[in-house]
Amino acid sequence: MEHVKAFIIKLVMITVVLGIILTGIFGGEFSDTLWISIILTALAYILGDLLIFRHAGDDSDYTKRNIIATLADAILTFAIVYFMGEDIFVGDNNLLSAALLSAVVIGLGEWFFHKYLNNHVFDEKSGHHG
């Protein structure tokens, strides 16, 4: 159940950030922004959180795991927004800026989201597996 809660928190965070950036600043359709948010959340949760953040080092090396996972999430965000955005922002030369801004802001959000995951979801020390 903790994974479902974490996934929803991540989806809301990403949707709000991309809504502000892609729809609010760059004028994309919100339906397209929502689609990108869902795809990005699913991939980032599986790759960035479950695989990289959880397994990039032992529990005592939280900072290292967080740096690696945050960078991976930022790179993934850039790639997803850029390549999915090609269809949305056709002929718009702001796609690179939109993808870069999205990657930076979501990367910052992910830094704090990983702290939440570490304390509430990946709590193996107590024998609880979220």
Image: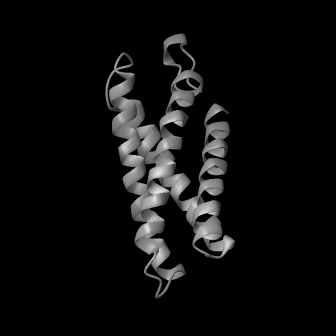
Q: Residue furthest bottom?
A: 91
Compare residues 38 and 74 and report the one nearer the observer.
74
Spot occupied by residue 121 in the image (x, y as percentages of width and height): 57, 27
**Count of labels in the image:** 0
User: Which residue: 32% across, 32% down?
Assistant: 56
* Residue 111 drawn above or below residue 73: above
Spot occupied by residue 69 in the image (x, y as percentages of width and height): 39, 39
Spot occupied by residue 122 in the image (x, y as percentages of width and height): 52, 25
User: Which residue: 55% across, 36% down?
Assistant: 113
Colouring used for the render: one colour
Q: Is residue 122 left or right of residue 60?
A: right
Compare residues 100 and 54 and report the one nearer the observer.
100
**Residue 29, quarter of picture:** bottom right
Spot occupied by residue 99 in the image (x, y as percentages of width and height): 45, 65
* Residue 26 drawn above or below residue 127: below
Q: Quadrant of the C terminus?
A: top right
**Residue 10, quarter of picture:** top right
